[in-house]
């Protein structure tokens, strides 16, 4: 483990004493977790007091099916391609969708002058309407990152100047990277020559679970 990472952990732990939910080194990089109420203040201090002047990435994560696999290879037999244990759609329920700490907003920061990196995790309190504070006024590049997380995961960023979809169509319904969103989607589109425009229709593709073959030596 690099001494620079250990030094950074001690520095961050001391600076934010009592305000971090967790602080640990993962994959040779410091990872801290902060509450949504403190996230804006802590991220602001990380930039202007600890020198993390560059926001490398901001992304959303959905932990709804974390640890659940549609297929198992460790104990699977050597024959057959139908080893699917279960389809996640079959165990989906309202209570499952409301599980705590389902959504997470992850920030990756870089200090150019100190050559340090840090990862910050924020879990919104409300799963049904996940909200965290926007950091556009801290790092201007967060604008499109936050719009992407909103578009694909439905995470809201309080204080964002223009929070609208950025990758999907304006009339798109749902958030495609949520784990409860079907792989086939809900609608499909095609060009109608008679109407002279693109039309949307219910999806005709059947959803199915494909289990890849396990190659053993």
Image (cartoon, rainbow, N blue to C red):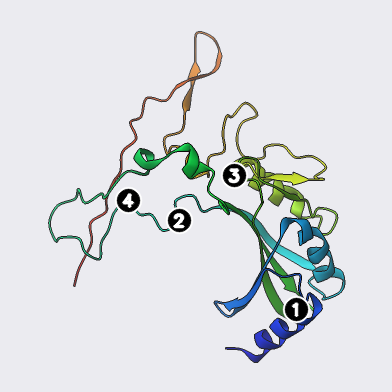
Q: Nearer the viewer, mark 2 or mark 3?
A: 2
The residue lying at 37 percent from left, 25 percent from top is 204
Distance, label 4 to label 1, CA atoms, is 39 Å
Q: Which mark is residue 70?
A: 4
Mark 3 secondary-structure assignment: helix
Q: Where residue 39 sits in the image (x, y, percent)?
A: 76, 60
- Indicate whether 21 appears above or below 202: below
Q: Is residue 114 visible?
A: no
Distance, label 2 to label 1, CA atoms, is 29 Å
Q: Where residue 69 sits in the image (x, y, percent)?
A: 35, 54
Counting residues from the start of the chain, the first of labels 4 and 1 encountered is: 1
Mark 2 secondary-structure assignment: loop
Q: Which mark is residue 66?
A: 2
Task: Give the left or right position of residue 176, taking residue 115 as reference.
Answer: left
Name the foreground residue: 79 vs 85: 85
Name the foreground residue: 191 vs 49: 49
The residue lying at 57 percent from left, 88 percent from top is 1
Task: Give the left or right position of residue 91, taking residue 135 as reference.
Answer: left
Q: Are marks 2 and 4 in contact (CB under 8 Å)?
A: no
Residue located beneath label 1 in the image: 12
Choose top left, top right, bottom left or bottom right for residue 68.
bottom left
Disc 1 crowd rating (10 Å Cα; few below 14, some 14-19, many 20+) is some
Mark 1 secondary-structure assignment: helix
């Amino acid at each position: 483990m690099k001494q620079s990472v250990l030094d950074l952990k001690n520095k961050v732990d001391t600076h934010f004493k009592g305000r971090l939910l967790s602080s640990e080194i993962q994959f040779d990089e410091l990872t801290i977790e902060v509450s949504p109420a403190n996230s804006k203040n802590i991220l602001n201090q990380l930039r202007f007091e600890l020198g993390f002047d560059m926001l490398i990435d901001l992304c959303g994560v959905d932990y709804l099916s974390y640890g659940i696999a549609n297929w198992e290879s460790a104990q699977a037999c050597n024959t057959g391609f139908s080893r699917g244990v279960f389809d996640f759609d079959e165990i989906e329920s309202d209570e499952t969708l409301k599980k705590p700490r389902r959504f997470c907003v992850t920030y990756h920061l870089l200090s150019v002058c100190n050559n340090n990196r840090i990862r910050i995790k924020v879990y919104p309190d409300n799963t049904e309407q996940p909200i965290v504070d926007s950091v556009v006024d801290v790092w201007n590049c967060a604008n499109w990152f936050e719009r992407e997380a909103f578009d694909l995961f439905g995470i809201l960023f309080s204080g964002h100047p223009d929070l609208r979809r950025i990758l999907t169509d304006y009339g798109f319904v749902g958030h495609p990277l949520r784990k409860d969103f079907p792989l086939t989607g809900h609608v499909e589109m095609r060009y109608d020559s008679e109407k002279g425009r693109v039309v949307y229709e219910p999806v005709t593709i059947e959803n199915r679970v494909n289990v890849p073959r396990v190659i053993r030596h």
